[in-house]
Image (spheres, rainbow, N blue to C red):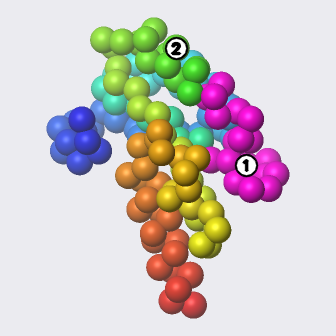
């Protein structure tokens, strides 16, 4: 199901949440549980992606596989109760870093690409 199909079919969704892997306030399991209890049909995890330097707001590169594993575990645990989506909010740091990087091909990039493109256009207008 595409983002456009989700948002045109229901209002019971949240496709943007920060997790324990970045600057979020709760772990993914608590978010999934709360989303089910609130009646959500679709829920997306979008932690801040790794970047090429340390940041307290971003996931570390070494955490990516753990993030994917936890997503897969929750997707199976909540199967039939809610549709869960894996993504990242990918920071655009100029030509050297962005959603086009080869380390990001596994992620649904629709939201991140829009954010990156918007940021790039904003910076080009300066």
Residue name at image x 35 percent, y 20 percent:
82
Q: Residue furthest bottom?
A: 126
Residue name at image x 56 percent, y 27 percent:
68
Give the labeled residue for mark 1: 57
Q: Nearer the viewer, residue 95 or 112?
A: 95
Q: Secondary structure at mark 1?
A: loop
Quarter-of-image position of residue 77: top left
Q: Position of residue 91 (x, y in %)?
A: 60, 59
Query: Which quadrant is home to the N terminus?
Result: top left
Few, some or many residues within 10 Å of mark 1 (<14, 14–19, 20+): some
In the drawing, does residue 96 fall left or right of residue 9?
right
Residue 54 counted in the magenta span = yes
- State the extent of the magenta-drawn residues as a range: 48-67
Residue name at image x 34 percent, y 24 percent:
83
Q: Nearer the viewer, residue 79 or 7?
A: 79
Q: Is residue 61 above or below residue 84?
A: below
Give the labeled residue for mark 2: 73
Q: How far apart are the alpha carbons under marks 1 and 2?
A: 24 Å
> Which of the two discs, 1 and 2, labels the residue nearer the N terminus?
1
Q: Position of residue 43 (x, y in %)?
A: 41, 31
Q: Secondary structure at mark 2?
A: helix
């Amino acid at each position: 199901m595409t983002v456009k199909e989700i948002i045109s079919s229901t209002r019971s969704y949240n496709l943007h949440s920060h997790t324990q892997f970045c600057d979020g306030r709760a772990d993914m399991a608590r978010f999934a549980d709360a989303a089910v209890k609130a009646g959500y049909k679709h829920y997306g995890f979008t932690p801040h992606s790794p970047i090429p330097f340390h940041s307290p707001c971003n996931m570390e590169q070494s955490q990516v596989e753990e993030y994917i594993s936890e997503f897969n575990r929750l997707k199976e645990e909540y199967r039939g109760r809610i549709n869960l989506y894996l993504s990242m909010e990918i920071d655009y740091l100029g030509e050297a870093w962005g959603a086009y990087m080869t380390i990001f091909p596994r992620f649904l990039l629709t939201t991140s690409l829009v954010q990156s493109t918007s940021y790039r256009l904003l910076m080009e207008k300066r």
